[in-house]
Image: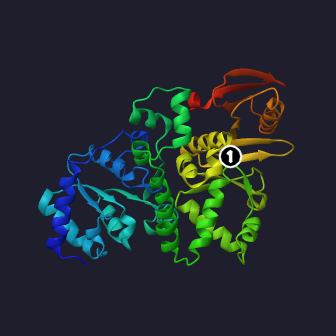
Amino acid sequence: MILKETLRGIVKSQRTSLSTIDYGVKRELINKINLDVPFALVLSGVRRCGKSTLLRQLIKKSKKFYYFNFEDPQTVNFEVSDFQKLNEIFVEEYGNSDYYFFDEIQNVQKWELFVRSMLDKGKRFIITGSNASLLSKELGTRLTGRHLRYELFPFSYNEMLRLTNKEAGKNSFDEYLRNGGFPEFLKIQREDILQELFRDIVVRDIAVRHGLRELKTITGMGLYLLTNVGKEFSYNKLKKVFGLGSTNTVISFISYFEDSYLLFTVPRFDYSLKKQLVNPKKVYSIDNGLSSANSVSFSADKGRMLENTVFQHLRRKYENIFYFREINECDFVVKEKEKITSAIQVCYELSEYNKDREVKGLVEALNKFELKQGLILTFNQEDLLEVKGKRILVKPVWKWLLL
């Protein structure tokens, strides 16, 4: 509980700080967000990817608004009952408004009670939080479906170019490939920023939130998976590697990594959901820079870095991404509604030595899903292949990212 006058001071201080904070590079996601829908708009994503900055950019769309940042250390004792005081202060200080902008709201238990009651009165909420579980799976029951979720990722290649004033091309893309897109790291270029970020995610978003005592084990598993981006893993193998007593524990740990947006798993495509669940999965990370700063072997493998970058771009656009393997393998197939709509192979450099392998996997996927055209993404090659009646575009990843 916080005294009303103490709360008033925090509100006014935070409001004043809005005019002094850099609004940063305009995020691409902003164009997809309509503030006037009668739902709570939820901005979720990994720590330090720029959610608070996006929130401030959205504030500029509204002339009259209320704003509160629950990450402020002064709000540590804020309770759900304090929302009534907060609302009174908003009206007393800034008049009536329909727009509430709340940053890191997950820090307050039962916050959804206030939001739901105000939604019933026609108010609009734009809220951020770092935990995907809180802001997606649990929201269905907490807000009874009255929310729209928008996922924010670290900077795209396009956003990185605008931040650094660089031109599109293989040189700037090579930097993006190595550095990733976390805004603070792009500005300061200190690896300890990304190492500390990894520790924060593991400790604050995973261990503390879920009451885990196995901090060493979950840290080790996180580093192991970051090191093996683009490779298959199985729950049973991870259970043996880390000496855990149950595969259910491994499954839980993996779900925590995904909830915090640190890692993503990609299943092998199969029309049988049961087989999808038991087949080995592949793992990808939220950001190349984060992986490189915490894994020496990952930073030395440009092929996997390229594949991870392609996955990140696909994940920004699509929910259902798979890898395909029968006789041969294709890196990514994308499912929209009930149909596979595209097949993509990733290869750092296409040569006479590896061409057959890369093409065979792609053509097999194209035949399987009755697609006429496929894509091979490379670091900096461009070509057009005609193979067994299929059209295969060879394209540099950096050009593809700009589309």
Q: How many marks?
A: 1
As drawn, is 30 to the left or to the right of 335?
left
Looking at the rendered structure, the secondary structure element under dot 1 is loop
Residue at 62% in and 68% down: 253
Above or below, 400 against 140 in this view is above
If the image is split into quadrants, where does the C terminus sit? top right
Q: Compared to 206, does 49 lie above or below?
A: above
Q: Position of residue 78 (x, y in %)?
A: 29, 73
The 10 Å Cα crowd at callout 1, few under 14, some 14 to 19, many 20 or more, is: few
Figure quadrant of residue 366: top right
Residue visible at 65% across and 54% down?
227
- Type of amino acid under label 1: Glu
**In the rendered view, does 86 fall on the left or right side of 401?**
left
Q: Whole-percent x and y of residue 316?
A: 54, 44
Quadrant of res 128: bottom left
Quadrant for the N terminus, please: bottom left
Question: x, y percentage for residue 168?
Answer: 49, 27
Residue shown at the point (69%, 31%) measured from the top left: 375
Which residue does the numbered mark 1 point to in the structure image? 338
Residue 297 falls left or right of residue 59: right
